[in-house]
Image (cartoon, grey):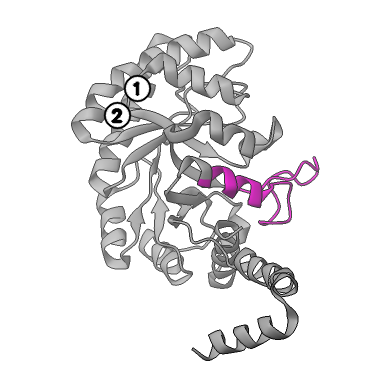
Amino acid sequence: MTNALHRRDFLQLSGGAVTAALLAPVVGTAADETPKKRKLKKAIMYATIGYKGTVLEQFKAVKAAGFEGVEPMSHMKREEVLKALEETGLKAASVCCDTHWRLPLSDPDEAKRKDGLEGLEVALKDAKHYGASSVLLVPGVVNDKVTYDDCFKRSVAEIKKAIPLAKDLDVKIAIENVWNNFVTKPEQAKDFLDAIDSPMVGWHFDIGNCLRYSASEEWIPVIGKRILKLHIKEYSKDEKKKFNVQFFEGSNNWPAIMKALDAIGYEGWGISEQPGGQSKDAEALKELSGRMDKVFAS
């Protein structure tokens, strides 16, 4: 009531037009300074945890730093991981397939592709045990023995073989964009998913990896709703630094990236994949956690 009276007195003294001109910028500035609350959950990739100790000790340190989840590797000791999850209350944000680099689904050797598929199946089962909804998969590698077309066809065929198990377990396969000379443009990511054509297969979008090729925010609207999880990673276009930078010290345009994620309605896990030195002890883990909060609020 008091505010209303003051406003009326001000209008009488100054005139409506002048008042409107003075008040509008103030209101707009206040709104602009309010950080947007996003439904993003903060996790860390297990393979990047620099903190030394047992799995349980590492998980306790991650929890104390303010993380809500962790991304275990596949083929870890399940009981050890389950115990650490239960004791700390951390959630499994995802499971990273541990075999996809040494046994790629694009390998010319059919026996190695078979082993790679079995590795993916173990990862899917691990995810089910941990309560994770997806498995991160690098689909293949293009090199002097494997063309882009070969990688595309072979990995699509092998991934399709894993879909029945993924359905039975209700765990999705999330393809990650990495430096494997495969899928270097957002349209190629869309084409790859279209070729598989299954709701059980989506994308694990690595924000740092794609910056080598083009702006991260340009990928997000193309892949769109098929982004299942995020790797939150900084990258510097300075060749001497690359991934060896902390959040906000690289080339990522975090406000533009967050705006693009808002536009597709992304909600869910943002998983840090920063170098292990940034999580080497309790203090470093807390700083990493705080920087991620700022990324999410950008």
Q: Residue at x 44, y 72 (%)?
A: 64
Q: Quadrant of residue 137?
A: top left
Q: Which residues are magenta?
A: 233-262
Amino acid marked by disc 1: Leu
Q: Quadrant of residue 18?
A: bottom right
Is mark 1 in CB contact (under 8 Å) with mark 2? yes
Q: Which residue is mark 1?
A: 117
Q: Quadrant of residue 225?
A: top left
**Viewer-proximal residue, 281 or 90?**
90
The verdict on residue 251 being magenta is yes
The verdict on residue 239 being magenta is yes
**Viewer-proximal residue, 174 or 29?**
29
| Res 121 label | 2
Q: Residue at x 36, y 20 (%)?
A: 159
Above or below, comparing residue 90 to residue 162 in the picture: below
Q: CA distance from mark 1 to mark 2?
A: 6 Å
Q: Secondary structure at mark 1?
A: helix
* Residue 196, position as x, y percentages in the image: 39, 17
* Residue 271, position as x, y percentages in the image: 48, 50
* Residue 175, position as x, y percentages in the image: 45, 30
